[in-house]
Amino acid sequence: MVIIDCNEWTKNGYLGDLSKRARQEYRLCSERNQDLIYRQADWDTDKVREFMNLWEKQLVRGKPIQWAYPVETVERWYAEGKILLFEAVKRNTVAMHFLKREGNYWEAQPPMWDKANLAYRHLGTWMWYQVILYGIENKIGIINLGGGVDKWREMLHTRDQYANPKYKFRFIPRSIKDNPDLQPNYEIINGNIREIHSNLT
Protein backbone atom coordinates (compact mmCIF):
# COMPACT_ATOMS: atom_id res chain seq x y z
CA MET A 1 0.00 0.00 0.00
CA VAL A 2 1.11 3.51 -0.85
CA ILE A 3 -1.53 5.85 0.48
CA ILE A 4 -2.46 9.50 0.64
CA ASP A 5 -5.30 10.73 2.84
CA CYS A 6 -6.62 13.49 0.61
CA ASN A 7 -8.75 14.91 3.42
CA GLU A 8 -5.60 15.86 5.35
CA TRP A 9 -4.05 18.07 2.67
CA THR A 10 -4.54 21.26 0.70
CA LYS A 11 -3.12 21.59 -2.80
CA ASN A 12 -0.42 24.06 -1.74
CA GLY A 13 0.38 22.10 1.40
CA TYR A 14 0.76 18.88 -0.55
CA LEU A 15 2.91 20.32 -3.33
CA GLY A 16 5.03 22.24 -0.86
CA ASP A 17 5.79 19.10 1.16
CA LEU A 18 7.04 17.06 -1.79
CA SER A 19 10.75 16.49 -2.24
CA LYS A 20 12.70 19.02 -4.31
CA ARG A 21 13.02 16.48 -7.11
CA ALA A 22 9.29 15.73 -7.08
CA ARG A 23 8.42 19.45 -7.20
CA GLN A 24 10.71 19.89 -10.20
CA GLU A 25 9.12 16.85 -11.83
CA TYR A 26 5.64 18.23 -11.19
CA ARG A 27 6.55 21.57 -12.77
CA LEU A 28 8.13 19.85 -15.80
CA CYS A 29 5.24 17.52 -16.57
CA SER A 30 2.75 20.35 -15.94
CA GLU A 31 4.55 22.53 -18.50
CA ARG A 32 4.62 19.73 -21.07
CA ASN A 33 0.89 19.05 -20.63
CA GLN A 34 -0.42 22.58 -20.24
CA ASP A 35 -2.35 22.14 -23.49
CA LEU A 36 -4.36 19.27 -21.96
CA ILE A 37 -7.49 19.31 -19.85
CA TYR A 38 -7.69 16.76 -17.03
CA ARG A 39 -11.28 15.98 -16.12
CA GLN A 40 -13.69 13.38 -14.83
CA ALA A 41 -15.10 11.40 -17.76
CA ASP A 42 -18.46 9.89 -18.53
CA TRP A 43 -18.54 6.19 -19.27
CA ASP A 44 -17.79 5.15 -22.86
CA THR A 45 -17.26 1.40 -23.23
CA ASP A 46 -15.47 1.58 -26.57
CA LYS A 47 -13.10 4.32 -25.39
CA VAL A 48 -12.23 2.57 -22.14
CA ARG A 49 -11.69 -0.71 -23.99
CA GLU A 50 -9.39 1.06 -26.45
CA PHE A 51 -7.20 2.42 -23.67
CA MET A 52 -7.20 -0.82 -21.70
CA ASN A 53 -6.06 -2.64 -24.86
CA LEU A 54 -3.41 0.01 -25.49
CA TRP A 55 -2.05 -0.44 -21.97
CA GLU A 56 -1.79 -4.22 -22.48
CA LYS A 57 0.22 -3.80 -25.69
CA GLN A 58 3.00 -1.89 -23.95
CA LEU A 59 5.67 -3.07 -21.59
CA VAL A 60 5.18 -2.34 -17.90
CA ARG A 61 8.44 -2.58 -15.94
CA GLY A 62 9.92 -4.33 -18.96
CA LYS A 63 7.23 -6.99 -19.30
CA PRO A 64 3.86 -7.33 -21.05
CA ILE A 65 0.97 -7.31 -18.61
CA GLN A 66 -2.76 -7.98 -18.68
CA TRP A 67 -5.69 -6.55 -16.83
CA ALA A 68 -7.15 -8.88 -14.23
CA TYR A 69 -10.65 -8.12 -15.51
CA PRO A 70 -12.36 -7.13 -18.79
CA VAL A 71 -13.89 -3.77 -19.64
CA GLU A 72 -17.37 -5.19 -18.97
CA THR A 73 -16.45 -5.67 -15.31
CA VAL A 74 -15.26 -2.06 -15.06
CA GLU A 75 -18.51 -0.97 -16.70
CA ARG A 76 -20.50 -2.84 -14.06
CA TRP A 77 -18.46 -1.25 -11.28
CA TYR A 78 -19.07 2.16 -12.84
CA ALA A 79 -22.83 1.52 -12.89
CA GLU A 80 -22.61 0.57 -9.20
CA GLY A 81 -20.88 3.87 -8.35
CA LYS A 82 -17.53 2.22 -7.61
CA ILE A 83 -15.50 3.90 -10.36
CA LEU A 84 -14.20 7.44 -10.79
CA LEU A 85 -13.07 7.71 -14.41
CA PHE A 86 -10.68 10.41 -15.64
CA GLU A 87 -9.27 11.52 -18.97
CA ALA A 88 -6.71 13.91 -20.39
CA VAL A 89 -8.05 15.71 -23.43
CA LYS A 90 -6.66 17.90 -26.17
CA ARG A 91 -8.87 17.62 -29.24
CA ASN A 92 -9.37 13.96 -28.41
CA THR A 93 -8.69 11.85 -25.33
CA VAL A 94 -4.98 11.06 -25.04
CA ALA A 95 -4.95 9.26 -21.68
CA MET A 96 -7.34 7.65 -19.20
CA HIS A 97 -7.28 6.06 -15.77
CA PHE A 98 -9.66 5.32 -12.95
CA LEU A 99 -10.07 4.89 -9.23
CA LYS A 100 -11.98 1.88 -7.92
CA ARG A 101 -13.80 1.95 -4.62
CA GLU A 102 -12.52 -0.72 -2.24
CA GLY A 103 -14.30 -0.63 1.10
CA ASN A 104 -13.47 2.73 2.68
CA TYR A 105 -10.77 3.86 0.23
CA TRP A 106 -10.04 4.32 -3.48
CA GLU A 107 -7.62 2.01 -5.30
CA ALA A 108 -5.77 3.81 -8.10
CA GLN A 109 -5.34 2.06 -11.43
CA PRO A 110 -2.45 2.89 -13.79
CA PRO A 111 -2.64 5.67 -16.36
CA MET A 112 -3.31 4.35 -19.86
CA TRP A 113 -1.64 6.24 -22.71
CA ASP A 114 0.53 5.86 -25.80
CA LYS A 115 4.00 5.69 -24.28
CA ALA A 116 5.69 5.07 -27.62
CA ASN A 117 4.46 8.26 -29.29
CA LEU A 118 3.89 10.56 -26.32
CA ALA A 119 6.88 9.73 -24.12
CA TYR A 120 8.05 13.36 -24.06
CA ARG A 121 4.92 14.38 -22.19
CA HIS A 122 5.57 12.18 -19.12
CA LEU A 123 1.82 11.65 -19.12
CA GLY A 124 1.82 8.84 -16.59
CA THR A 125 3.52 11.00 -13.97
CA TRP A 126 1.26 13.94 -14.77
CA MET A 127 -1.87 11.78 -14.46
CA TRP A 128 -0.78 10.50 -11.03
CA TYR A 129 -0.31 14.04 -9.77
CA GLN A 130 -3.61 15.14 -11.26
CA VAL A 131 -5.67 12.40 -9.65
CA ILE A 132 -4.08 13.12 -6.25
CA LEU A 133 -4.85 16.82 -6.61
CA TYR A 134 -8.41 15.96 -7.66
CA GLY A 135 -8.72 13.86 -4.52
CA ILE A 136 -7.41 16.70 -2.35
CA GLU A 137 -9.63 19.35 -3.91
CA ASN A 138 -12.72 17.12 -3.65
CA LYS A 139 -11.84 15.53 -0.28
CA ILE A 140 -12.46 11.96 -1.41
CA GLY A 141 -10.54 10.36 1.45
CA ILE A 142 -7.74 7.83 1.09
CA ILE A 143 -6.24 6.92 -2.28
CA ASN A 144 -4.10 3.80 -2.38
CA LEU A 145 -1.56 3.96 -5.23
CA GLY A 146 -0.98 0.25 -4.71
CA GLY A 147 1.87 -2.23 -4.37
CA GLY A 148 3.95 -3.64 -1.54
CA VAL A 149 2.54 -4.85 1.77
CA ASP A 150 -0.79 -4.00 3.40
CA LYS A 151 0.75 -2.35 6.48
CA TRP A 152 1.46 1.34 6.09
CA ARG A 153 4.24 1.87 8.64
CA GLU A 154 6.00 -1.29 7.51
CA MET A 155 5.68 -0.14 3.90
CA LEU A 156 7.29 3.19 4.75
CA HIS A 157 10.19 1.48 6.54
CA THR A 158 10.81 -1.11 3.82
CA ARG A 159 9.83 0.75 0.65
CA ASP A 160 13.24 0.25 -0.99
CA GLN A 161 12.61 -3.51 -1.02
CA TYR A 162 9.67 -3.30 -3.43
CA ALA A 163 10.49 -2.46 -7.03
CA ASN A 164 6.86 -2.01 -8.10
CA PRO A 165 5.63 0.68 -5.71
CA LYS A 166 9.05 2.24 -5.03
CA TYR A 167 8.64 4.89 -7.72
CA LYS A 168 5.23 5.86 -6.34
CA PHE A 169 6.83 7.26 -3.21
CA ARG A 170 7.77 10.34 -5.23
CA PHE A 171 4.10 11.30 -4.79
CA ILE A 172 4.24 10.97 -0.99
CA PRO A 173 5.07 14.13 1.04
CA ARG A 174 8.41 14.29 2.82
CA SER A 175 6.86 14.70 6.26
CA ILE A 176 5.30 11.24 5.86
CA LYS A 177 8.31 9.47 4.38
CA ASP A 178 10.69 10.99 6.94
CA ASN A 179 8.53 10.09 9.94
CA PRO A 180 7.04 6.63 9.39
CA ASP A 181 6.45 5.90 13.07
CA LEU A 182 4.39 9.08 13.44
CA GLN A 183 1.93 7.97 10.77
CA PRO A 184 -1.37 6.24 11.52
CA ASN A 185 -0.80 2.51 11.97
CA TYR A 186 -2.96 1.62 8.99
CA GLU A 187 -3.51 -1.89 7.66
CA ILE A 188 -5.81 -3.26 4.98
CA ILE A 189 -8.10 -5.72 6.75
CA ASN A 190 -11.08 -7.39 5.06
CA GLY A 191 -11.03 -4.85 2.24
CA ASN A 192 -10.90 -1.75 4.44
CA ILE A 193 -8.09 0.45 5.73
CA ARG A 194 -8.11 0.30 9.52
CA GLU A 195 -5.95 1.98 12.11
CA ILE A 196 -4.44 -0.57 14.49
CA HIS A 197 -4.02 0.65 18.05
CA SER A 198 -1.45 -0.89 20.36
CA ASN A 199 -2.72 -2.56 23.52
CA LEU A 200 0.38 -1.44 25.36
CA THR A 201 -0.07 1.25 28.03
Image: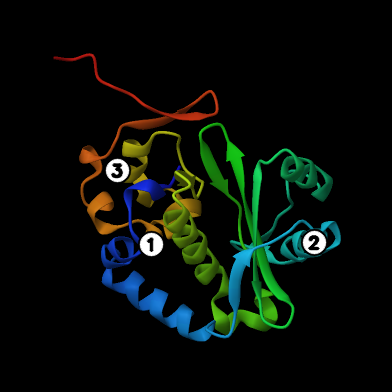
- The answer to whether the residue labelled 1 contacts the one labelled 2, judged by CB atoms less than 8 Å apart, is no
| Residue 114 location (% of width, % of height) | 70, 74
Earlier in the chain: of badge 1 and badge 3, it is 3
In front of the other: 5 or 125: 5
User: In the visual, does 179 lie left or right of 62?
Assistant: left
Asked whether residue 54 is in view, the answer is: yes
Q: Secondary structure at mark 1?
A: helix
Q: Amino acid at mark 3?
A: His
| Residue 176 location (% of width, % of height) | 27, 50
Q: Label 2: how many residues lie within 10 Å, few (<14), some (14-19) or many (20+)?
A: some
Asked whether residue 113 is in view, the answer is: no
Q: Label 3: how many residues lie within 10 Å, few (<14), some (14-19) or many (20+)?
A: some
Q: Which mark is residue 157?
A: 3
Q: What residue is disc 2 on?
A: 53
Instruction: Return the residue found at the far front.
Output: 138
The residue lying at 73 percent from left, 38 percent from top is 80
| Residue 169 location (% of width, % of height) | 39, 56
State the CA–CA distance, disc 2 to disc 3.
36 Å
Q: What residue is disc 1 on?
A: 170
State the CA–CA distance, disc 1 to disc 2.
27 Å
* Placement of the C terminus among the 4 image quadrants: top left
Q: Nearer the viewer, mark 1 or mark 3?
A: 1
In front of the other: 156 or 22: 22
Total marks shown come to 3
Earlier in the chain: of badge 2 and badge 3, it is 2
Q: Amino acid at mark 1?
A: Arg
